[in-house]
Amino acid sequence: MKDRFGKNADALKNKKLYLFDMDGTVYLDETLFDGVPELLSAIEKKGGRYVFITNNSSRSVDDYVAKMHRLGLNNIAEEHFLTSGQAAFDLLKEKFGDKLIYIQATKSLVSEYRRLGLNVTEEYTENASAVLVGFDPEFTGRKVYNTCKMLTKFDIPYYATNPDWVCPVEFGYIPDCGSMCRSIERATGKKPVFIGKPEPVMVFTAMKKFGFTKEETVVVGDRLYTDIASGNNAGVDTVCVLSGEVTLSDIEKATGNEAPVFVFDSVKDLI
């Protein structure tokens, strides 16, 4: 088995836990990439497990399950997901308990947090203990006005779900959470603590939850500075696919924790 550069990739045959990014890796908007159903089936047939780890916090896990079913992956369930939104929830709940959190995010994420018991508001308030910004395709001027006012008037902890600059869509890209936070930084001088990839938290969480070792785990994604870096930071093998954001030129210039172990044109080549 050879990767895009002719490197021996036989080590992938021994993996048991496959951690997939979603946007640009297994689908693009409402289009599932070729080979995804066959690959997931092959992983299960050999006794492995797959989990989707995503920095895209715009949807709740229920929404992601519904989307996968809509794309034809009817065996996908809640247990197949770990999101930066979930990681942010765990951190905020642990640090702040029932205290009020100001949040700039989608209605879906806000509703999920409230359902799970996190005390959140989307309105400017003097009573918040922290600020959280998530990837938000529902972004409005009023939202960013409130966020900038919160960060300017109060010196409270400021978090963001993920540092991605762009999110791939069918025509190209739209600004992701990292870009939104950069604009907020220009206005307020405040930088957030990012929670999702490239931090290794979701990788470690998946390994612990399902009982697999680093040697049995691989991260598959299309971004060097998030997907690949998170796997490398966790000490597991990484696969970069060329179906999303990254280009061959990017990979050739990659160094340190952004350099993937293996490179393939798409997940279909992993079958």
Image: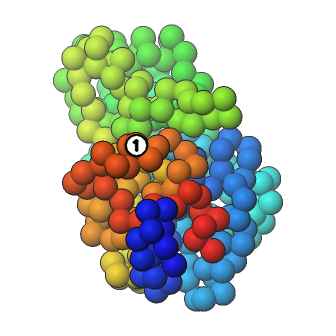
User: How far from the left and from the top, in percent, is residue 165?
Assistant: 42, 32
Q: Answer left or right for 144 relative to 112.
A: left
Q: Residue at x 46, y 86 (%)?
A: 14
Q: Please tell me how crowded label 1 is: few (under 14), some (14-19), or many (20+) other residues with Cα within 10 Å.
A: few
Q: Quadrant of residue 30?
A: top right
Is 151 located above or below residue 211 in the figure?
above
As shown in the figure, which amino acid type bears the numbered disc 1?
Answer: Ser
Q: Residue at x 30, y 11 (%)?
A: 187
On-image quarter of the C terminus: bottom right
Do we see residue 261 in this rendering? yes
User: How far from the left and from the top, in percent, is residue 39?
Assistant: 65, 72
User: How far from the left and from the top, in percent, is residue 114?
Assistant: 53, 43
Q: Residue at x 36, y 26 (%)?
A: 181
Do we see residue 111 in this rendering? no
User: How far from the left and from the top, in percent, is residue 260?
Assistant: 36, 59
SS state under label 1: helix
What residue sits right under mark 1 in the picture? 249
Identify which residue, 270 or 157, lies in the foreground: 270
